[in-house]
Image (cartoon, rainbow, N blue to C red):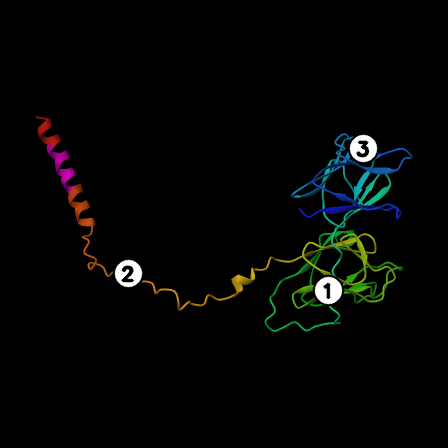
Amino acid sequence: MESVRLRFADQGREDRLLAIGVHGLGRRAGGALELVEGGAGEPVRLCVDRRGVWLNVDEGAPGVHVNGREVRRMAMLRVGDAIYVDGTELRLVSPQPVKLPPAIETAAPAADAPNLRVVLRGVGGRFHGRCFTLEQPRLVGRHPEADIRIDDPAFADRHARLELVGDQVVLRDLGSAEGSLVNGEAVRDALLEAGDQIVFDGHHRFVVEAPRRRPAEADVEAVPDDSAPAALPAPAPGRSGHVSRLPWLLLAAVGIALLLAALLLFGSG
């Protein structure tokens, strides 16, 4: 899998790259939570393999939460998840910077644009389990007409807009005070892909989901190659010079049946 970074809430601490292996989380001198390489003996561990990142919690470990939900044993993590270990906040962050959208306000979908059926699926907050399609732009904010309404007095009436521009998902800030989180990074505008996680107002979480597109080669119709030799026509039945095997098989079966009948008749005498 693509490497991820672990970010501590403390602003003065550098991100730690999580390579494949086991990374323990434990307290050290001074009481600060530290990442312990190869810390298989720690009660809280991040296990990274080619499938993703797994959080393992031993019985009796200090309080562990992921996106506000308590974890007692195991949880699979995605980029952008917020992890709380005994009061310390950490976040999984992508090593790649968030992509910026094109410098255009909006674009009408082309007549031949593919129907990608892109959706935002809620994975945290009051919208958990709900899906919003992006066949039309979606307004996020406190306004009564907002498609994704977050009724918080501190939240902007028109916080952001999500829309399809061609076959890409664009997040555009509409003048909010704090922006949004995309894959753990604070942003205002972003170009989103399937699997990206967006967080509004700290805990309203969504994941972009879209069906896989066919490879470009599959969209091109096959064109006959005039330079290739033409296929030879199949020989007409009865003109190949080979005698069909079917009559011989029938004659052999009849002969065997007659032989068996003769043996039974004369052998019994």
Q: Say whether marks 2 and 1 touch (CB < 8 Å).
A: no
| Mark 3 closeness class: few <14, some 14–19, many ≥20 residues within 10 Å | some
Which label belongs to residue 170? Answer: 1
**Helix, strand or loop under label 1:** strand
Residue located 90% across and 33% down the image: 29
Mark 2 and mark 3 lie on one chain; the one further toward the N terminus is 3
Q: CA distance from mark 2 to mark 3?
A: 74 Å
Q: In the image, which residues are magenta?
A: 254-262
* Label 1 packing within 10 angstroms: few (<14), some (14-19), many (20+): many
Q: Position of residue 198 (x, y in %)?
A: 76, 56
Between the residue at mark 2 and the residue at mark 1, the CA separation in whole angstroms equals 56 Å
Residue 188 screen position, x and y as percent: 81, 62
Q: Which mark is residue 116?
A: none
The quarter of the image holding the C terminus is: top left
**Which residue was labeled with disc 3?**
61
Amino acid at the residue labelled 3: Ala
Q: Looking at this view, is 158 or 18 the one in front?
A: 18
For the stretch drawn in magenta, the main secondary structure is helix
Judging by the rendered image, the residue that carries numbered circle 2 is 234
Q: Secondary structure at mark 3?
A: loop
The kind of residue on which mark 2 rests is Ala
Is 222 on the left-hand or right-hand side of 150?
left
Q: Which residue is depicted at the point 20% across and 52% down?
A: 244
Task: Report helix, strand or loop for mark 2.
Answer: loop
Labels 2, 3: front one: 2
